[in-house]
Image (cartoon, rainbow, N blue to C red):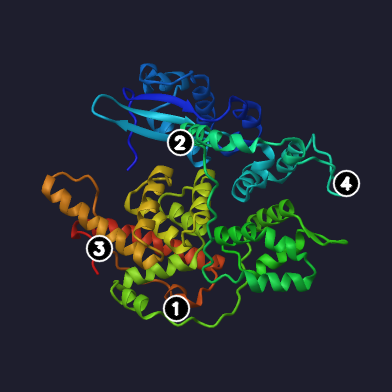
Amino acid sequence: MAKAISPKSGYLVTTSAAISQLNNRELAEFYQPLMSTAAFALIQLLRTELQPHPNRDQLRRHSHLLALLNVGLNTLTEARNQLEALELLRTFYVSDGEQNFFVYDLQAQLTPRQLLSDDLLSTLLLQNVGPEHFERLVDLAGQYQYDVENLDEDTHSFFDVFQPDQAELGRDEKVLKNAKQSLKLAAHERVVQLPTDGFNYGVLAQQLRQDGVASEDLQKYRELITTNHLLYGLDEVALRKLVLQAVDWGVKNSFQPRRFQLAVAASQGQRKAPATVETKPALAEPQKESQQLSLSTEEQQLVAVAKKLAPLQFLATLKKQTGGGFVTSNERYIIANLIKMGMATDVINILSYYVIINQELPTLRKNLVDTIANSWQRAGITDAIAALKEVGQHQKRAQKSTKRRSASRYRQRGQVKEKLPAWAQTSADNHPKATDEQLAESKKLLQSLHRKQKHNHKEGGPRS
């Protein structure tokens, strides 16, 4: 679990990035729209506190940050969470008996071109600033670029210019190895296979190729298209229309990713119900069938809802049910990162349900979500049924711990009993897409679930 900061807790600022990679102008242009005012002020303040060879003698208290930023602990914590979600900051906690303090490791920010090429960040940026401002940022990122695509390259390679002494390589290898270990140079990022949840990209790509879209572009931008499906619940039919809107029809019929993102943003603003693709119901695996039977009727119905809705739809429903909140840009990025790391969308939905409903938190918090996600991945949890069972086990462990200590640290909730509307009781194997009317019904359902949970609070943990 994430450690809570206090005014008296110490902190130390460090970085392995070059100072040139901490560009405040680009931070203001491209990152500031993604974060709160407090988060933007915090990252700039931390950068000013960098000192050579950081050590414990340079520790400061968080009261220093609170006073300079003129904010409270909750605002400071949320600001730090946003910087972590945007991968501008990594937080470590030191507790060795002598001193307890936080280490804030500043990360190199992406260049404007890298940020706009990142499927998740560019989508989030577009949602926050709107199409007109987004196009201005695209133009700003390429203001010094000259189109060299059709030019003949005459660049010399390394070995055209340098000839390393082979006899010296063996002696130098140890020095280089020690340098790499000392600097802890980062390894290449591993490639994660995105979950598909029954989404058939092969069929979509085949249809688009028949429409004339360039095959190499369909392969190159597969992750972008799939990510938008997972985030918004867009099916093959809806995505085909959006991709065709983003094609530069001509000799190459090339796909334009920025135009596609604008089209997706416009489609979400219109809130049109996605079309459905008829598929044959898949036969349930015997193991999953037996797991399903071990759940109560209400838990089975919750699993069905988690399988039907895309993560952002599900989270938005939870928000409205718990007081009319909205999905923040930080939460969009957290969910997008969970998708990128390969977590199934129905598991993400159960995780959101646990944080918002069971923990009664107003927003998803990156440290908490990362802790749960890592724990579930180590436990091999790959579907909503296993995730819900793990939530139940956690609640039972917390209940036993509460009885031993005679002090409640985590409030236990009783199991809910509320009949779902007919659309949610259909076989989850059919994976029907949720319409606006279905979303409205699901909101009513989750409201009833939450009220019933509070009513049954004294009954203990989940019943199976």
Which kind of residue does numbered mark 1 sit on?
Ser
Residue at (33% x, 27% y) in the render: 101
Q: Earlier in the sequence, mark 2 or mark 1?
A: 2
Residue for badge 4: 151
Residue for badge 2: 90
Residue for badge 3: 462
Circle 4: element type: loop
For the residues marked 4 and 3, what is the alpha-carbon distance in whole angstroms?
Answer: 66 Å
Circle 1: element type: loop
Q: Position of residue 43 (x, y in %)?
A: 52, 28
Which of the image's four quarters has the C terminus? bottom left
Circle 3: element type: loop
Are dots 1 and 3 in contact, CB under 8 Å? no
Q: Is residue 45 left or right of residue 111?
A: left
Q: Is residue 37 left or right of residue 443?
A: right
Which kind of residue does numbered mark 3 sit on?
Pro
Residue for badge 1: 427
Q: Quadrant of residue 382?
A: bottom left
Which kind of residue does numbered mark 4 sit on?
Leu
Res 413 visible: no
Circle 2: element type: strand
Compared with residue 404, is residue 417 higher up or lower down, i.e. above or below? Answer: below
